[in-house]
Amino acid sequence: MFENGSEQIEPRSGNAQLDRALAQTLAKLSKTFDVLPGFAYYRDNGRPNALATPEVRLQRTDGTVLFGLEMLQMLLQRPEHPDASIVAVCAHEFGHIVGYKTRLIEKLAPNRRDPFRAEQHADYIAGFFAGMRKLERSDFPAIVFATTQQSFGGTLRGSHGTGQERGEAVLEGFKAAYERKVTPAEGIQLGFQYAMTRK
Ligand SMILES: [Zn+2]
C-alpha cells in the first residue's frame, strides 16, 4: 500500500514475546526469498495498514517493510490463529520487496496507479510461504493466509483485487510450494507468470 516517507516508526510493538516470534519468522522469510528489508512498526493512526517500499529507511539493503500498530492490534483480535494472520501480512509485504529487488515490479505495475498484478504477485508469494511452512509443520494453519488476504479484498475490484481474486492467488502460490514443491526462486517466477495473466 502507500507510504509517504513520514511514517512515525516504532522498533517494538510493546509485546516482547510477539516481537521475538515475529523476528524469527521474518528471518525465515528473508532466507526463503533472498531479500533483506528493514522491518519496523509504525503509527498507522486511524488507518490500519502495512506497507513495503524500495526505499532504504532502516539500514537494510532491500527496502523497508512497515507494519502498522493498529493493524497489528486488529489482527491480534481475530479469533482464529491471529499469529498466522500477522505472518500472512508480513509475507505479502515481503512479496512486494521481492518484486522490487528482482525488478519484476517494472512489468507487474508499469503504472503505479494500477498495482493489481503486483498485489497478485505478493499474494502468490504469501501463499507460497504458507505452503513451505506447511511442508515443515503439517499443522501449520496455511488456510489463514488465504482468509486473511481475502478479508482485505472487497467484493468490488480495488487496487488489491477482490477478496476472491486475492484468495485464488494465495492458493496458487500455496500449491506451487506444497504440492509441486518448486523452489522459492521458481515460485517467484511462476507467481510472476500467474500475475501477468490476470486482468
Ligand atoms: Zn500489497
Image (cartoon, rainbow, N blue to C red):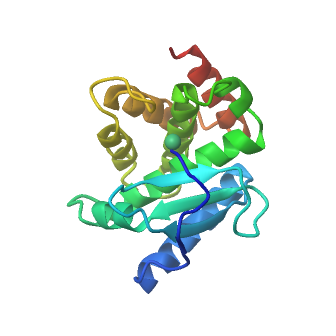
The image quarter in which residue 114 lies: top right
Image check: 70 left or right of 176? left
Please report the residue visible at 31 percent of the width from the left and 67 percent of the height from the top: 73
Residue 161 place in picture, x, y as percent: 41, 28
Count of numbered badges drawn on the protein: 0
Q: Is residue 136 above or below residue 175?
A: below
Residue 41 place in picture, x, y as percent: 50, 69
Q: Is residue 132 visible?
A: no
Residue 125 place in picture, x, y as percent: 57, 40
Residue 138 place in picture, x, y as percent: 42, 54
Please report the residue visible at 71 percent of the width from the left and 56 percent of the height from the top: 63
Q: Nearer the viewer, residue 67 or 181?
A: 67
Judged from this view, the residue extending furthest toward the left is 79
The image quarter in which residue 84 lies: bottom left
Q: Is residue 61 visible?
A: yes
Please report the residue visible at 30 percent of the width from the left and 41 percent of the height from the top: 151
Image check: 32 left or right of 147? right
Please report the residue visible at 53 percent of the width from the left and 70 percent of the height from the top: 8
